Image (tube, rainbow, N blue to C red):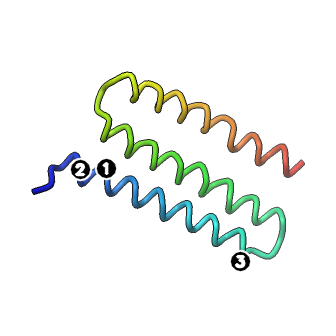
């Protein structure tokens, strides 16, 4: 029987993967460069954030979780900034 921790991990990982796939679909389907950047930037940040959150739940409280939090903070700052810089 799966525990609630495993179920929460799978929900976060699958949801993050769906967001990442929607972002990839947005790159193909959206008509303009700027709308493609918007679709990819938002879903990329959310998808990676949910995947990292799922890994944090599975990892428990350890040094790995601290590293994942630092990666998430770095990603939350750099992904929107890079999208903004490319749009300009």
**Is 8 in front, or is 55?**
55
Q: Which residue position holds label 1?
A: 9
Left or right position of 56 against 24: left
Can you say whether 75 is above or below 31 in the image? above
Callout 3 crowding tier (Cα within 10 Å): few <14, some 14–19, many ≥20: few
Element carrying mark 2: helix
Q: CA distance from mark 1 to mark 2?
A: 5 Å
Q: Are marks 1 and 2 in contact (CB under 8 Å)?
A: yes
Q: How many marks?
A: 3
Please name the residue shown 67% across and 70% down the image: 26
Query: Which dot, 3 or 2, sits closer to the camera?
Result: 2
Which mark sits nearer the N-terminus, 1 or 3?
1
Callout 1 crowding tier (Cα within 10 Å): few <14, some 14–19, many ≥20: many
Please name the residue shown 56% across and 60% down the image: 20
Residue 46 position in % (x across, y down): 54, 51
Can you say whether 20 is above or below 25 in the image? above
If the image is split into quadrants, where does the N terminus sit?
bottom left
Please name the residue shown 84% across and 43% down the image: 85
Residue 2 position in % (x across, y down): 15, 54
**Is 60 in front, or is 83?**
60
Residue 67 position in % (x across, y down): 47, 26
Which mark sits nearer the N-terminus, 3 or 2?
2
- Using the image, tell me which numbered label, if any, was put on residue 80: none
Residue sitting farthest toward the right? 88
Can you say whether 88 is above or below 68 in the image? below
Left or right position of 84 against 12: right
Left or right position of 70 against 34: left
Identify the image quadrant of residue 30: bottom right
- Using the image, tell me which numbered label, if any, was put on residue 29: 3
Q: Which residue position holds label 2?
A: 6
Q: CA distance from mark 3 to mark 2?
A: 34 Å
């Amino acid at each position: 029987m799966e525990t609630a921790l495993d179920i929460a991990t799978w929900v976060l990982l699958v949801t993050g993967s769906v967001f990442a796939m929607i972002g990839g679909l947005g790159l193909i389907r959206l008509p303009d460069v700027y709308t493609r950047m918007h679709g990819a930037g938002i879903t990329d940040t959310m998808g990676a954030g949910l995947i990292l959150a799922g890994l944090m739940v599975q990892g428990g409280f350890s040094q790995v979780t601290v590293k994942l939090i630092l990666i998430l903070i770095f990603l939350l700052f750099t992904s929107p900034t890079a999208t903004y810089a490319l749009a300009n």
